[in-house]
Amino acid sequence: MPGICKIIASLALLLVGSMTAHAQDQVVDGRLDASAAAPLHNPHVDIVVVTVIAAETGPFTNADPPLGLVRVDETLRGAEPVGAIYPVRWSGHVGDGDYENRGGIRDGAWVPPELKREWHQRLLVPPKPGDHVIAFAAGVAEFESIWAQAAFRLTPENHAFAIAYMAPPERNAAIQMSAFLLVLLAPLGCAILHMLLRSSTVSGARRYRLRLTLWLVLFLVLPLYAFYESGISIYSNIRVDLLLLWPAIGLTLAIGSVSLLSDKRPALT
């Protein structure tokens, strides 16, 4: 009797272990929850509902992931047209215990993260043709392909969770560029207004309007910059634009303040 109990216990452990490994090795997770917060909150990552229409046959590993074709059924975030067919590359999931070295900034230099050898050798089970999947990928429309950084079964619960917790896409590029250029040109506008105010040929009424315009530029430059910043996510970590915007704001405030303080208040004549 004790021997039978040991056998049953061993089989149970093997079953639990195989189920755990199987779950970890699946390309497509069953449940979308808070553990997927990074791709949900990153507006640079597109979210598409797709149907698998073709898939390679294995075996596969994380180092040699499966390829295939998918059809876009719905775009939750991104610019992918419904009905478009894209080649897809499926990726395995990376857990907290899969890193040999998480990388980061070391001695002023970027060190890339390093995954354990076991992760690269781990078997990977791809989705099957006909499966409906919520896929997370960056630049799908741009590169005309999907490199699925994460994938989840399409269920009503997963679909509702994605809609509820995904960040909106970043603001339209044309609007952002317009705000950027206006902030960048503000110092030039202040300099032109300053020179006009110093001209002896400007009438009192026009001088009043010029001063009002200068006050308006000073009043609007910071809210305009705040509007520009509100359209950029925290995931845009390479901000070369700030090397231009911050000096432009400083010059705007300096030129405008000096001009207003040095100019006498005109009479409305």
Image (spheres, rainbow, N blue to C red):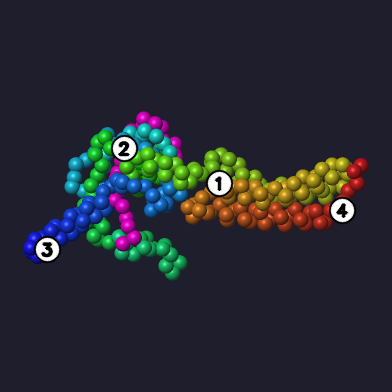
| As drawn, 257 above or below 267 | below
Query: What is the magenta range?
Result: 77-97
- Circle 2 residue: 132
Q: Is 84 in the magenta?
A: yes
Which kind of residue does numbered mark 2 sit on?
His
From the top left corner, tell me how far across and down residue 29 is, in percent.
Answer: 31, 47
CA gap between label 3 and label 4 equals: 97 Å
CA gap between label 1 and label 4 equals: 39 Å
CA gap between label 1 and label 3 equals: 61 Å
Say which label, 1 or 3, has the lower sequence index: 3
- Circle 1 residue: 231
Pointer 1: residues within 10 angstroms few (<14), some, or many (20+)? some
- Circle 4 residue: 264
Say which label, 3 or 4, has the lower sequence index: 3
Say which label, 2 or 4, has the lower sequence index: 2
From the top left corner, tell me how far across and down residue 102 is, in percent.
Answer: 36, 63
Q: Is residue 181 left or right of residue 91?
A: right
Say which label, 1 or 4, has the lower sequence index: 1
CA gap between label 2 and label 3 equals: 41 Å
Q: Is 78 in the magenta?
A: yes
Q: Nearer the viewer, residue 97 or 147?
A: 97
The residue under the point 57% across, 54% down is 242
Which kind of residue does numbered mark 3 sit on?
Lys
